[in-house]
Image (cartoon, grey):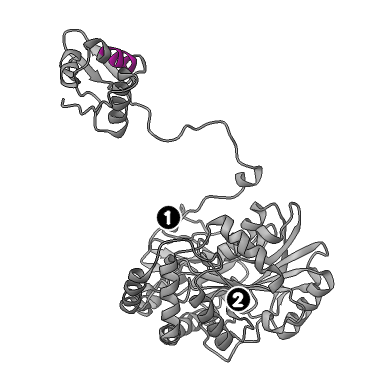
Amino acid sequence: MDVHVTLSGRGDLAAQVYRQLLEAILDGRLRSGERLPPTRELARRLEISRNTVAVAYDRLVADGFLVGRAGAGTFVSAEPVRSRAAPKGVVRPRAVWETIPPFSPMAPATYDFRVGVPDPRLFPIESWRRLMAHESRASTAGYGDPAGHEGLREAISRHIGISRSVRAGAGDVLITNGAQQALDLVGRVLIEPGACVAVEEPGYPPARLLFRSLGARVAGVPVDGEGIDVSAIPSAARLVYVTPSHQFPLGTPMSLARRAALLAWAERRQAVVIEDDYDSEFRFGDRPLEPLQSLDRAGRVIYVGSFSKTLLPTLRLGFLVAPASLGPALRAARRLTDWHGTLPVQATLARFIDEGLLARHIRKATREYAARHALIADALSRDDRLRLVPSVAGLHLCARFAPGVSVRPAPDLAVEQLDAYRGETAAQPGLVLGYGAIGQQAIPEGLRLLGRSLIPEGVARPVADPGGVARPVADP
């Protein structure tokens, strides 16, 4: 076996030989059962004493990495050697992390009704590549503003002002790696250990888990046809997370009366409201109600948005608009977290917005998603085993089961159950169906397969199939 060892000529030569042979074994360059050169030969090649090589070999034998065979030579041990993974150790995370499940992506399926996934085929990739190539060449070295690319902050402030009536200048916008980082920054700045945070029930699981991980006591508040039940918000809550434009996962908008009640509650309790406007760009009906942020006159609302649905989740682009009093702390939190995102990508999105490409893409995608929405809504509304929840926006629909109905797993079908979005309280069973990951042509057959999977309770069910019902994993 030709063993490559290079000596620096300084220090403990036997230790150098030992370390380099160990690296070769652990990296797999020396495999189990392979023969090493005799000590005399390796010493001659390295121009060192044979005893120095023998010391290194003896250490590796003692550690179990080599084995000597009388009359045959020295070989890499046939026994499994230690991997290069970090030691398991005895250090444990904080107790809350024992209760937070790791990310588990859903298995691919032919009929994919996953929630929160846009259709990448609708994304204008060639236009994006052109802009990205230009910005990559123009990018400079050095750190940037933690608030993000100035041009993108200006473009976003104009875009959300026109499309959503959000009142914000470029200085009020902070760019984030998706909406989830926006929630994390807000939590870092506002949540004291043990503080009460109110969330919608049912609601977005990653937000609930994030607040818990930051030390908050998370309280689920029921949602009805008008939105969050303001009268049920705990008096101790000082932070409330809501999705008023398109409640996640039910899909209903918060009524104007309920919005006014929530803002009045926040001002009375000196609380903060996080408004997550995650996918309201895609609307299939009238103009939505004014966002909480535009109705807020007391500076109690933090508006969070994301491009994960309008563009692609892999771009990791989101933003928040906060009252000026929170700006310095949020910028400092961003700098301490990861300083700033990828500036060439942010500059590309700025040009993408300024050239009108975002608005054009949203118009095109809205037409396609509206057709998929109509197909699914029509089918669900005609099935007496389901109770469709009205919705006129976004990338998913929700339907509750009629009494005595449930769903069983089916090969090639990926759907999500409503009870996966609840916290500690029981939820009425049902389904949440996304239509970003499934094309129009596949929807009818996917719905037929879903229909055959709906069964009365008490009927024997097969063992769960990995391609069947799954829990939500999407990051708006």
Mark identifier at residue 197: none
Give the farthest residue toward the bottom.
286
Question: Who comes first in sequence, dot 1 or dot 2?
Answer: 2
Residue 52 position (above or below residue 367): above
Left or right side of 40 for 219: right
The N terminus: image quadrant: top left
Q: Which amino acid does label 1 sit on?
A: Pro
| Magenta stretch: dominant secondary structure | helix
- Residue 429 in magenta? no
Left or right side of 143 for 301: right
Q: Please state the horizontal and vertical placement of residue 318, each as a whole percent of the image.
A: 52, 70
Nearer to the camera, 455 or 328 = 328
How dense is the environment of label 1, judged by Cα within 10 Å: few (below 14), some, or many (20 and up)? some
Task: Please identify the quarter of the rendering in which residue 237 is found.
Answer: bottom right
- The residue labelled by disc 2 is 171
How many discs mark residues in the rendered view? 2
Residue 127 visible in this rendered orientation of the protein: yes
- The residue labelled by disc 1 is 466
Q: Which residue is drawn at 40% across and 66% down?
A: 140
Task: Please identify the quarter of the rendering in which residue 313 is found.
Answer: bottom left
Q: Give the range drawn in magenta.
A: 54-61
Q: Please state the horizontal and vertical placement of residue 282, each as a whole percent of the image.
A: 50, 82
Left or right side of 148 for 16: left
